[in-house]
Amino acid sequence: MIRGAVPIIARREFVERIRDKGFLISTGITLLVLVVFVGAGSLLAGGTSYDVGLAGADARALEQRVVDRAAALDIEVAVHRFDDAAAAERAVRTGDVDAAVVDGDGIVVRSDPPADLVAVIQAVSARERAEGALAGAGLTSGEVQTALEQPPLAVRALEPLDRRQREYAAVGFIGVLALYGQLFAYGYWVAAGVVEEKSSRVVEVLLATVRPSQLLRGKIIGIGVLGLCQLALIGAVGFAASQLLGGLRFPEGVLVVIGLVLVWFVLGYFFYAGLFAVAGAIVPRQEDLQSTMTPLSILIIASFFLGIEANQHPDSLLAVVTSMLPPSAPLVMPSRLILGEAAIWEGLLSAAICVAATMALVPLATRIYSRSVLQRSRVRIRAVLRTPREE
Amino acid sequence: MLELVGLTRRFGHVVALDDVSFSVAPGEMVGFVGPNGAGKTTAMRIALGVLETDAGEVRWRGRPVDARVRRRFGYMPEERGLYPKMRVLDHLVYLARLHGLEPDDARAQAVRGTQILGVADRSDARVQTLSLGNQQRVQLAAALVHRPEVLVLDEPFSGLDPVGVDVLSGVLREQAAAGVPVVFSSHQLDLVERLCESVVLIHRGRIVASGRISDLRDADPRRLVRVEVAGARPGWYERLPGVRVADPLPEGAVLELAGAAAAEVLDAARAAGEVRTFTVVRPSLTEIFRRAVGA
């Protein structure tokens, strides 16, 4: 019978908050910012593209070559034909095209020549003219081709750029950011919810029917489920936006990050929720909450910076250690996992440590909460733990 | 029968309750009376399990009360408390559910509660938008929403307007008539006198008197007269021989006859002015209480 109280309490926490206009608006804003962010990212990350105008003789011959050469360099070029040089120049001047090639012997740009585009055109034109010159010197077209088809120099990068790794790090960063925001916001809600019950005195009505531990559990579960749902929604919208707007070469990375973030939110939230509840239970009013929450805020902010650090140097000793310690693990381990720096067993071990720490903290937090929640003045934790009553 | 047996509770060095025992029979309405800090709230909190007792126990139907049984109690704490942002009906449904009612039943009971207490038109309003009087009505509806077997109300009348007092009195009478033991604390002794057959008087953590009000009166040997005189000089009665002032009134006083005869007092009153009232009265609850605490 009495066990049934926890789901009822959790349900109230969930329903009352999800109905709140402020919550809906802030969720909407978060999603909007996310879509804009993904959109802007895909614009910036997308390959370079240019519009080129061609006018006069040789235009047709140049067209295909420019496009091919550009494509080889991962540059997208759209070619526009103009009847005469004047029309081409007009287009350059208005910005309709980035550069124009007139009569095959000059490049017109408005002010600042786009270096890679100019290089492409120069190369194509040089080849064109070299072919002409060689043919003029009496070589057959076969000989001309052989002479000009020299293999490009091999490039050897000393520190090669791993595009996949880079993208995973970027997506992982967003994941850490989301986790940080979510842990903070929902932890705060637990604390504020506890204070609300204290300051409105409704807690005495509630404690006449349920035990403090049930009240605490129900509150933490209800708020946590809401946080998880919101996070899942943000993940789903983020993934959908990145798919629709493009910009991701390795979309499976996003899915892995979303999964990791959801799992680590659950682990981190339950670890922190009991502490936030204590922060709320020992103060009488909302105004006093800031002071007791400060140590927790510092802990989460520090973990967030460790998470960012780990995102950049996932193999550092600092990252390895902090990815195993419960306060920081939720913000550090996801990056190490997505970047392939932590093995799955490490992730599982870290999760197990986090769960164990939570299990150890919950009875303590429940005890402090139970003994403080009816007190009207600021409570000293040490004094509360010493009194042998009010389980 | 709700029984509080030998309850003792200390807060640090302060003894809040010292061997407090009393009982409330089904259908009985008991007033729990005492000055501030006497231990009323502590006793009620212990009865509801909000506080633990150092010694003694609370029994219902002859058995010690546990959490499951307490769930069927109705409680209104002195510190009124509701979620300020919740809507009235939702709030009542929620509390009914916590007390173990099924969803449909909880809703029906919540609706009924708002109707009985006259706040049905504010069902969808947030609690914080209600006037204090209406919040108090919702609070009482909350105490009643789960058809409690026992009602324990801490200062239920404080802060109510006269209409609210009448509504609440009616509701409590109905509950008692339906066989629910009702115990409430109050400072308004006239109200307790009007509503309750029995009282428990507590002072400094100890029960100083308890039982039926009529029995307590009969046990009081004092002879009292109520005299009101128009146009008399103030305090005309203060120096009468063989008379003690029990309770001063605007135009006279309740006087205790300690040696003087009623007729002598009446003569003095006539001499003082125009006599409006002269009646032999039985001691009021206030006087019984004063005497019990030796004040």
Image (cartoon, coloured by chain):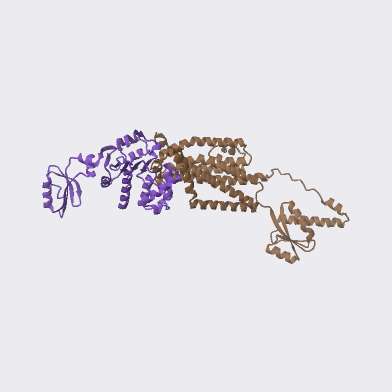
Chain colours: A brown, B purple
Nearest the viewer among A43 and A296 is A43
Q: Is residue A111 above or below residue A337?
A: below
User: In this picture, is B88 found above or below A266?
Assistant: below
Image point 43% across, 49% down: which residue? B90
Q: Residue at x 45, y 39 (%)?
A: A214
Quarter of the image where the C terminus of chain A is located:
top left
Task: List the single residue furthest toward the right.
Answer: A138
Against A86, residue A154 (above or below) is above
Q: Residue A325 placed where, x, y %?
A: 55, 37
- The reply, left or right, for residue A246 in relation to residue B70 is right
In what quadrant of the picture does the N terminus of chain A appear? top left
Residue A287 seen in this snapshot = no
Residue closest to the eye, B17 or A288: B17
Q: How many marks?
A: 0
- The single residue placed furthest to the front in the displayed view is B178
Q: Nearer the viewer, residue B228 or A23?
A: B228
Residue B184 in picture, x, y percent from top left: 31, 43
The quarter of the picture where residue B180 lies is: top left
Say which of A299 and B84 sits in front: B84
- Please identify the quarter of the rendering in which residue A264 is found: top right
Q: Measuring from the top left, give residue B234's x and y in whole percent.
A: 16, 52
Q: Is residue B281 left or right of residue A388?
A: left
**Where is residue A310 drawn, in percent x and y?**
59, 41
The answer to whether any part of residue A13 appears in the image is: yes
